[in-house]
Image (tube, coloured by chain):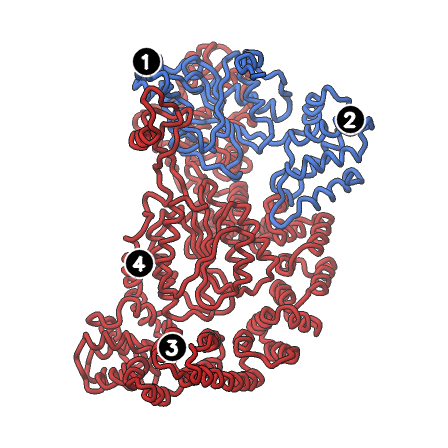
Amino acid sequence: MATGDQEQGNGSFHNDHVDQWNPVSFGVAFARRMRRHKGVAHAPSLRTALAVPSLLTARYARLRALHATDYVAAAVLCSPPEDQTIADAIARDLVFPKAATEAPAATQEVASAAPVVAAEVDAADPLAGLLGDLADLSIDLDDVDDLEDLFAEDEAQVADAFELFETLYSSADARQRALGELVASFGGAAELDAAGAATELLVEAFVKERLEAHMEHLNPTQIQQACHAGFGGLMCRLATQPWALAGALAGSGRQEALQTHLDELLKSATAREAGKTLQYLMPHKDTERFETFKADCLGKAADLSDHAELLGGLDEWIEPADALFDASIADAPRRGLQAARWMSQQFGESLEARVFQLWLDSLETPPTLDQLGEMAVDCPAWHETIDAALARRLTVMRLECSTAKSNAAPMPDSVIHDINTGHGLSTCGVEHGVSVARRLATEGLCSLWDRPQFLPMLDEWLEHKIIPFDIKRLADHAEHLGIPPSEVYDRIGDALVQLKQLIESNGYDAARYRMLVDRVDGLSDDMAAALAQGACSNNNLEALAALLAVNMGATAEVMPDDQVCEALGYKGIGGGPNLLKQWFTHQSRLSDGLKAQIKGIAKEALIDLAFNWIGKGDGSCESGLVPQSRSRPFRVGDELDSLDMESTLDAIISSGKALDSVTLDDLFVSDTSKGRAVLTVLIDISGSMSGSELAMCAIAVVMLLGKLRSDEVALAVFESNTHVIKNIDEPTDLDVVADKILDLTAYGGTRVDAALRWATTQFAAAHEADVRVLFLLSDFYFFEDETELMKLGSTLTDQGVSLLAAAHGYSDKRMRSALLQTIGGRPLDLSSLERLPELLLDTLTQIGDGMQ
Amino acid sequence: MALDTLKLLADSKVEDLSDPTEILLEGQYRAAYDAMVDAQNAGLYVGLTGPVGSGKTALCRKFAQDLGRPFDWVTFSDLVRPSNLIGSFDPTLVFKYGFAPEAFAPGPFTVSALRGGVFLANELNRGDEYVLNTLLDALEERRLYIPALRSWHKVHDDFYLIAAMNPVENRGTRRLPSAIKDRIKVWVRVGYPKRSTELKIVQKHCGEYQVPPATLELILELTAHTRDDPAVESPASIRSTIGIARLAAERARRLERKIDNNVVAEAATLVLTDAIKMKPGRNIEKYVASLLTKTLGTTG
């Protein structure tokens, strides 16, 4: 039994005012509870179990007394900073059993599991008693399993997290109910159970931890609930975005601070920020302050884009004032039209035709085809105007070409420009635009009188996926120039005719099918269905494979599902990139069962294709992008072991020095530092992207993720929404990535702000990166206000990010230059998206070379 | 006249490295100090975490000074290599002695470990994992391997390590490797001190100036606002408070004016504009101007 004033018979110290614990039993119980808590960043080790009683003993030696607060303090101090909140809650739970539901049972259990036998204590060495206690625990320190046994707890004694959740969720008390609702939004009772939060105190710690971790992504309701649950102060402190701060201030009733914040926002915020702020104030929409702020914001809107941003936040249709139309038409009609289009999608209120008409009325001269391509609206006025513009262009074109013909002059630049115009029209989203583009192609080619230029120009149009309207006329014109018409048919229509004949004659020639499939650009639904029915009845898998490769949607609709899977890629007909192209073009037309099966096949094809690229270029998913070993000049403190003899001798020989006059400047060492790069990739997949372009993006994305270490790459694609493929802190699983990518469809407009904001969070999460690169592939026709994008650009600049701004085809060069000027970096131009994997490989090489 | 470097170095040499400015052991500093004492008595290494300029380093100096042991430190960054801690051969001496102990220049960690000093690993979480791992043997096994000499050395019984670091959210910091984290067993958080403590600290650092207490209160009010305002990401440190007080006092002395609110506002504008960091989307100049108007009634 204990002697003197140091230790009592139960293992506690004299003047230890905590009845139910002694330092050792508390240390073990605390470590056990911490280990069971899934929310802790570092599960306590054996050392922690020992550290708590050690610290308590030292404290006792200094103060000659221990109180409950000392136990709690010791538990907190012996936990790493990120776990101290949980440690505090658990320690309080143990020490103040009134707040806990299972503490008494746990106490008894620990007491019986760890009977503490008093030892003779050397008064000069307060640790002796503790060590004695530990010895009596019969813990074999070489066999941690013994301690694991101590940590194992009878689950039956733990309060049911599900019941606790139900109690909170249905509580009449507003604070408890808010807590329950937050738990529900963070995974519900199952998550609570997994985290081992079995008391209200631990639930609070659980919720607090989740709030801190997800602050950037909390929605307005969650912020309001957090304020109701007593986390208002925390929300105000953690909020980094002005709208989240407004929600937190409103929720926590800090009216004065809220007013100041809103006043400042009114002065300096962009419409986007104001719209988001309105969204976060929506839970408080019945207040006068909300109404005033809403009215002020609407009154401050400068044009239709601003108005659209505000409506986005309010989620309510409010008719825009006439002045807003006028302002948009005067300053940025294209952006105004995009805003009108967005409002039409969101609220079903069509404004596009009105915007178009106002724009048309504002012009002093009739619009060009290029302008009309940018201001495309599917309305009679646009159809009429573009037809007139085409007629004007054709008149000028004929004049130019006849002049060129009579003077034997080279082809005028405007003919080449027409191809770009045609591309713009064919991708403007209005069917009539495609028809105009095809007519322009026909007329352009038929106006050419220079024989050597005819076929290259035809190829150029076809390269842009524009098939001239009148092929017969084109063939006649070619013949007139001395070019065999078959050259025209071969390029445009002949492959299709050949394929049709081969299928109708029930032909078997896999090589020929493969060749024709590559040359056929498209097949009408009716023809595909008719041919597929014939091939089905003949069970000609080669023909069916060819049909699936050129129009999967229509062909699959008339075939049994089993036969589709059997025929898909049969004998290599239409596999690989073509399968992906068909998948992205036709996936919406496939039945659910078939869709799942084809997706599986497409996934394998995607990963195979990506792996073809993974073996090329720099970077590996194991060693990281930035080389880990480089030669650099010696500096004081370097070890001689790290001398790079080759570089050093080179330097000495090239300087012509004798060995005895070598100085430190002549020495080189291998630098063993491990550099880390972070590459965040954003790819724009908005409306105009075709199936084959999406397929190339998919291959490039999987390639990139397969090449890089998972902590070096983050990736998202965006249109109106941002789809995160991989966050920087997530492990890379190519199967999961491929699944996500194959579900993408090109849709909607181009909103880059959320994507850029996401990129900033990715760079912020990578503190230790040496090189930070943002790769942005887009046409840069963004919906948002330029000022706001520049603000986001400045944030990226602050993070030391370099921008690689890649574009293909038509792009808004002004916006791209502005972003590059703000962030810093350089432009990259892609002639076609097929070069994307290659371009990304080049990018990796540049990063590996230390691009800043 | 040529610069006599040797004389310059000899004249400026400091023999006594103890900190002449005594830290105020009250409030959170007292609690932290006590925790450090307990940890040291229990044989547990301690880690101090807290924002920039909250007094962590000063606390460590005080602790080492009170223990009466030699104090060595290294401030970690990406550039610190194992040899900066352990030591390395002096290449020029190697030509004379070969790879012998005579040519070896021990690093501060080796010196501290072998002679039983207190070693401060300042900004520990800015160091590379590869470098931090070189500390492990000395902390756990109480013996130190010096790779250059290919020999093990016993760590002195009195050797003690303290780590100080900024929160992991701060730029440039990394997550500590779990092996190191597991060796540091006591974690003390140091925040900004209470108003009364900070007032005493500022007074101590403004000894040569006669700054009226009411003015110091206003300056403290200014910096306290930055710590409470949710719009501020990185608030003003104690150094900023001292900076404003000293700059205002010096400016008033030069201009032969009394330290009024205008002088304080001018000094505060100069100090705070670079000392604090706002959350995204907030303008620092506007914020400082509004803070000065609210607290001092003028922007200077």
For the N terminus of chain B, which image quadrant? top right
For label 3, the residue is: A457
Q: Amino acid at mark 2?
A: Arg
Pointer 3 chain: A
Residue A472 visible in the current orientation? yes
Callout 4: 10 Å neighbours few (<14), some, many (20+)?
many
Q: Secondary structure at mark 1?
A: helix
Q: Colour of chain A?
A: red
For label 4, the residue is: A610
Q: Amino acid at mark 3?
A: Met
The reply to whether callout 4 and callout 1 are in contact (CB within 8 Å) is: no
Which residue is drawn at the image coordinates 33% and 43% (left, top)?
A623
Pointer 2 chain: B
Report how far apart the C-alphas of labels 4 and 2 lie in the structure. Answer: 71 Å
Q: Are marks 4 and 1 on the same chain?
A: no
Q: On residue B97, which mark appears?
A: 1
The reply to whether callout 2 and callout 1 are in contact (CB within 8 Å) is: no
Asked whether A609 or A307 is in front, the reply is A609
Report how far apart the C-alphas of labels 3 and 1 lie in the structure. Answer: 79 Å
Q: Kindly report which numbered mark, 4 or 1, lies closer to the viewer in this rendering.
A: 1
Answer with mark 2 or mark 1, whichever residue precedes in sequence. Answer: 1
Q: Amino acid at mark 4?
A: Ala
Asked whether A392 or B234 is in front, the reply is A392
For label 2, the residue is: B254
Q: Kindly report which numbered mark, 3 or 1, lies closer to the viewer in this rendering.
A: 3
Quarter of the rendering containing residue A464: bottom left
Q: Are marks 3 and 1 on the same chain?
A: no
Q: Kindly report which numbered mark, 4 or 3, lies closer to the viewer in this rendering.
A: 3
Report how far apart the C-alphas of labels 4 and 3 lie in the structure. Answer: 33 Å
